[in-house]
Amino acid sequence: MAKPLLTAPAEAGASLWERVALAILVVLALLLALINLPYAPPTWFDEGSHLHVPKTLVRFGVYADISSEGFRYFGPTIGVGPTVMLPIALVFQVAGVGLLQARLVMVTYLAFALLGLFALARRLYGLQVALLALLLVLASRTLRFEGMVEYGRQALGEVPGMAFLLGGLLAYALGLYKPEARRRYALLAGLSFGLALVTKNQFVLIVPATLGILALLDWFYYRAGDWWLRLAPPVIAVACFGAWTVAMLAFFGPAGFSENLAKTRQAAGGAIFVFDPEATRRAVVYLVQVYGGLLVPGLLYSLWRSRERTAEGLARLAPSLMALLWLIWFVTSLGWARYAFPAVILGSLAVARMAADLLHELYARRQRLALGVAMLYLSGAILLPLGLTAQVVLSPKDAAQRMAAFMDGNVPLDVIVETWEPEMGLLTDHNYHYVPIELLDPAVRRQWLGGPPVAYDGLEAEPPFVLLGPFSGYTAIYPDDVLEEEYEVLYGAEPYLLLQRVGE
């Protein structure tokens, strides 16, 4: 009988097939990360909104979003941290403002995240499980929602945040395995966790709580670490986030900071904490699709296997516990798949370990039929989503770039263009007026949970141009009757439509 692809114990050195498999995965990751980078996935609302900040910093020297009425200090300035904004601004300063330049920065973060995941999985479980975990995250999308590759190709905070988070978990594990260097690894873990919190502020909901629980479990149950490893990571992580909060307070001033805080609480009420049965149902439907439905079973299996009171048990518990806490929050939120993304990536380790253990057990017991079925199912759970990701990468869409080119040649830079498509503010230098940011959460909440339409009077100012696109269409923010009566189509690049006021 042939030996299965995966076996439980990691060998001391990499075999030939393992080295070949790693080389193939590296090439696959590079291709998926770089092919058609500026056009796939097509740029959209969140990415454009984030990129306003580094562009505004380069053009005006101000760390802020911008609209025709002036600078805006809420939204993207706090949703994604300076660990993303400043490197992109530096690249913009050196190579010019552009979507390709920004996405190359993100692909660099993607490479670090994949490397961190591979290093952590190899340290915890061995090379074979690490190879499978890496393959799983490359195939982490579902039929409707994006995965590691798609998020890593866009200017979003999730993948950079995961790069720092995985670095922190790796340092934490090394601190448990290497008592002689525990203090150094504890400090490094705390700093890396702190950078993750600064990068993506939603991480504050889960990471400190997980570190606190791990400290208590180590103190009362595992007895594997020391007080440096129990206290330094959560204290330093929270201190890093606190330092960034103080910096924002100094930058915005007390009034601006209080306004930001109030709007953040509004956003939390609108999307982060929902407790809606329909949102929970959507979240559960998403979870049963990830990794062929193996995510939750894998995490539960990992928790059960991590019960041994050893350094190894605690190190293996850390990513699975963090992922499980993330999923508990996810099912009580708006149910947006991006909220579950960190748990999906961390959960790849647990799923890979469970699959490896199962295949090894079936092989040892000579259960040929069951082994074949298990390997076939695992292959399908990887190849189908991987094919969907490849389809996205190989299907470039340049509608935003075509609209930008038309506007550069036909619309004066000084006139007002009313829109809720912030990605266009990166691609051109026109004088856009955007819908106020405080309407974002009510508009999104209405689409997900129902309710009355969001009232917006932006067309009462009679802007000479209105640029419609995917997000304004999704939210129906502009009344159709006013558009039909007072505007005519000037140019279209599906899904974008540029309207000019009649008589202008």
Image (tube, rainbow, N blue to C red):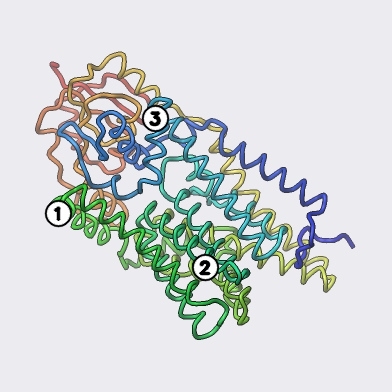
Q: In this image, 228 relative to 428: left or right?
A: right
Q: Which mark is residue 459?
A: none
Q: Position of residue 406 (x, y in %)?
A: 33, 18
Crowd tier of the residue under label 3, counting other residues whose Cα lies within 10 Å: few below 14, some 14–19, many 20 or above? many
> What is the CA distance from the residue labelled 2 to the residue labelled 3?
38 Å
Q: Nearer the viewer, mark 1 or mark 2?
A: 2
Residue at left 35%, top 67%? 277
Residue 183 circle label: 2
Q: Which mark is residue 92?
A: 3
Q: Position of residue 150 (x, y in %)?
A: 50, 43
Q: Considering only order in the chain, which callout, 3 or 2, is on the residue closer to the N terminus?
A: 3
Disc 3 residue type? Phe
Point out the image quarter for the N terminus: bottom right
Q: Give the residue type that dot 2 points to.
A: Arg
Give the residue displayed 35% in from the left and 37% down from the top: 51
First of labels 1, 2 by sequence position: 2
